[in-house]
Image: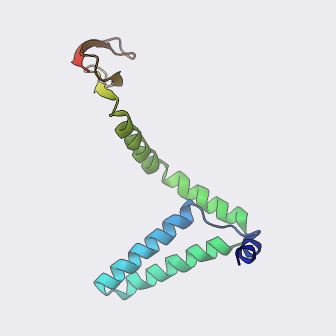
Amino acid sequence: MKDKLIRFMAGRYGIDSFGKFTIFTGLIAALLSNWMDSFLLSLLAWFLIIYSYYRMFSRNTYKRATENQQYLSKTYRIRSFFGQQKNLMAQRKTHHIYKCPTCRQKIRVPKGKGRIEIRCPKCNTTFIKNS
């Protein structure tokens, strides 16, 4: 069975970031339409799910890749913001992150060093903080 699926999908586009987004949005719209009893939302949900399967089984890989690149370029700022927040949360376990009082540059200082003098690498302002 697995071999049949692999042969069927050979040459087809498959799933990508835009496909995942359309499926997820379609499922959310389906749940909301069921909860709100809305015909238009249900229609939108079906359209999104069918469209995502159409993209998945499409053999026009160039066009699907172009659509995905457009989606990725339009959502770059949102995705990079959340990536930065995730990175900051991971760093907060071992470091303090302070802002320079003059230029607002973020400065990362290791935890557990006591009261230290911090020099801003951007404007050379020095200030004292607990680490």
Q: Residue at x 55, y 80 (%)?
A: 50
The image position of residue 3, as x and y in percent, is 75, 74
Q: Residue at x 70, y 74 (%)?
A: 2
90 relative to 22, above or below: above
The image position of residue 55, as x and y in percent, is 63, 72
Which residue in the rendered view is the most extreme toward the front?
Answer: 1
Comparing 63 with 106, the one in front is 106
Horizontal placement of 96 versus 56: left or right? left
Horizontal placement of 28 versus 15: left or right? left
The image position of residue 52, as x and y in percent, is 57, 73
Image quadrant in which the N terminus is located: bottom right
Horizontal placement of 13 versus 71: left or right? right
35 relative to 12, above or below: below
Image coloring type: rainbow
Image quadrant in which the C terminus is located: top left
21 relative to 78, above or below: below
The image position of residue 120, as x and y in percent, is 34, 16
91 relative to 118, above or below: below
